[in-house]
Image: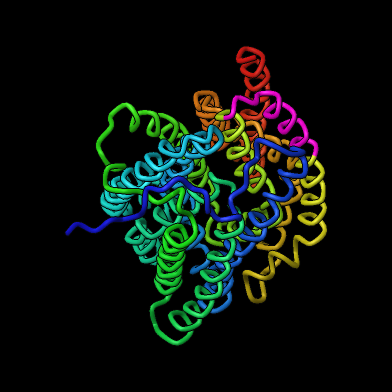
Amino acid sequence: MGIKIFSHKVPRNASSAAKDMTVGDPAKLILLYSAPLLIGNLFQQMYNMVDTIIVGRLLGQNALAAVGNTGPMNFLVLGFAYGLSSGFAVITAQRFGAKDWAGLKRSTAMNIKLNVASSVVLTVLACVLAMPILRVINTPEEIINQSYSYIIVIFIGIATCTMYNCGACILRAVGDSKSPLVFLIISSLLNIVLDIVLIIKTDMGVAGAAWATVISQAVSAILSFVWIYAKYPMLHVHRSDFTPDVWFAKQHISIGANMAFQFSITAIGVIILQGALNKFGPAKIAAFTAAQKVEQLVTIAAGTFGVTMANYGGQNMGAKRLDRVREGTNKAVVITILFSILSAVFAVALSDQLTGLFLKDASEEVLSAARMYLRITAVFYPILFVLFIYRNVLQGIGRGFWPLMGGVLELVARTAAAYTLPLVWGFAGVCVAEPMAWCAATFPLAVAYYIIIKKIR
């Protein structure tokens, strides 16, 4: 007798955690949906930061530089995977908004199939290309072995990250932003414990931090799907929902590929910038790594509101409520600009203290370089925050081409800056490259959004 994966009943008893964002005040919905996402992202940043703090303080400056050196590669591959998962779930959000329960189940099944397939392909490619990429970006010889030890473990664990993203994106598509928060908290706490065991109590070095991350992600992935099975009858899929459907697969892949390539194009620019940075030596690499970790922490609301708007846009587009898409986007822009100003104040006022978290007895050279990066980029945080709003709402309403073009413009701007500005301004030129890329993407996306909304109307 075959195993029935989930039931096929109409979702009368769906979990109350599901949130219909097609009704109610958009500003209130956006804030309430974003709150658990923000807390979850903080915990995710926490366990990423714990890796970095323990590595920097216990294993030294070169070890921190080695882990930081792999950041763009990590972003390239895992960002691509996250883009796919998020894009696949746009269709899920639209089916939920349209109250198409059969389509919702089929979309859930398609999410699972496509995420499993993509994780296998990405794992093979990433593991094969890891060392060649480290060579291409001019990784200093004194840190290349540690960089490889760290990133190869992360790449081996791509499936754990992908399947967590799959489960979390499905839950968020139906308006549940709270459950992924709980799983991230559990994962974060577990990651801290594993960091202590694998780094402090063993001789695994930077690889221990990578294994701690992979194992923690595996646990959160399992919890996500157990929760879906236990609490969401409307997401329960049967074998028939896995029946091959080329047209439906193309729908998912079209949006998923756009979002994934958008991440990858941005990541390629970051890798090019890393190559320019590596010429300044391990101290500057360590400073840049610490400063970007600080930036990721203080600007965490930007990505949070971006995820919110992707799902808000998807649900309301599915419900054919374009008026709500417009109203919600306008209010989100105002909200996110206020958050960006607060983020900039924190980044500038606490730059030395936050940078010091990552390195014990950080040298003045490192602190000064990190301070320079944060003071330059903080001025442009409002542009960065608004970028996430327009990029994600366009994805949510199924217009993925322009966000992809925004990524291309980011790549061009970041590459141009990496090859020219360091020659004139030195390390400051590397710092300026980031806000140049944000500006190059934000303004065209804002124009595209208003043109597209007018055209749809």
Residue 331 belongs to magenta span: yes
- In the image, residue 438 lies at what x, y percent? 64, 35
State the residue at coordinates (46%, 83%). 197
Say whether residue 339 is visible: yes
Between residue 210 and residue 228, name the one nearer to us.
228
The residue segment tinted magenta is 319-334
State the residue at coordinates (32%, 26%). 247
Magenta highlight: main SS? helix
- In the image, residue 177 lies at what x, y percent? 60, 53
Between residue 131 and residue 37, name the one nearer to us.
37
- In the image, residue 32 lies at what x, y percent? 72, 50
Residue 88 belongs to magenta span: no
Between residue 189 and residue 179, name the one nearer to us.
179
Q: Is residue 380 above or below residue 4?
A: above
Q: Quadrant of residue 330?
A: top right
Question: Is residue 344 shown left or right of residue 131?
Answer: right
Q: Is residue 329 above or below residue 241?
A: above
